[in-house]
Amino acid sequence: MAVMTTDADWDALRARLVRLQEAVVAEIRAYPAPIPACDAQYNHLLERRAALNEARARLDAARAGGAATVEDFLASTPVLAEG
């Protein structure tokens, strides 16, 4: 497997995270009211949004620190496999 560490690789991965975040936020906005606290699907969307926010912060830190490759980041970020 080729190691991807160029700026374009990081930019493409960040753009993917942003698209996934935007899709989840759109689902949350379109979710029908009322929203009961025990609504598992809605709660899953909230958890996914939080996981994507955390993944984007980790991506930015990994890229800035130069400590990881894109492959290393992908392997440690299961939320990307879901979307």
Image (spheres, rainbow, N blue to C red):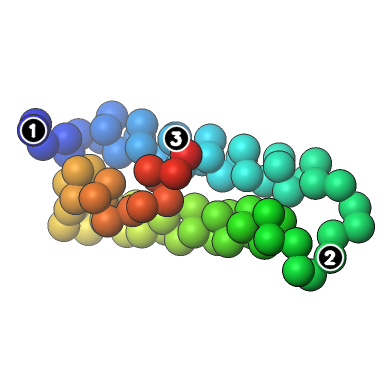
Q: Earlier in the sequence, mark 1 or mark 3?
A: 1
Mark 1 or mark 3, whichever is nearer to me: 1
Mark 2 or mark 1, whichever is nearer to me: 2
Q: Which residue is mark 3?
A: 15
Secondary structure at numbered mark 3: helix
Q: Label 2 to label 3, Cα distance in Å? A: 32 Å
Q: Amino acid at mark 3?
A: Ala
Q: As drawn, which residue projects farthest toward the right?
A: 34
Q: Would residue 36 be found to the left or right of residue 61 on screen?
A: right
Q: Which residue is mark 2?
A: 36
Q: Residue at x 71, y 40 (%)?
A: 26
Question: For this rendering, which residue is in front, 30 or 69?
Answer: 30
Q: Amino acid at mark 1?
A: Met
Secondary structure at numbered mark 2: loop
- Does residue 60 show up? no
Question: For this rendering, which residue is in front, 51 or 42?
Answer: 42
4 relative to 48, above or below: above
Q: Amino acid at mark 2?
A: Pro
Q: Are marks 2 and 3 in contact (CB under 8 Å)?
A: no
Residue 42 in percent (x, y) is at 71, 56
73 relative to 5, above or below: below
Q: Earlier in the sequence, mark 2 or mark 3?
A: 3
Residue 12 in percent (x, y) is at 36, 31
Within 10 Å of the Cα at label 3, are there few (<14), some (14-19), or many (20+) other Cα atoms? few
Q: Which residue is mark 1?
A: 1
Q: Are marks 2 and 1 in contact (CB under 8 Å)?
A: no
Q: Would residue 68 be found to the left or right of residue 43 on screen?
A: left
Q: Residue at x 58, y 61 (%)?
A: 47
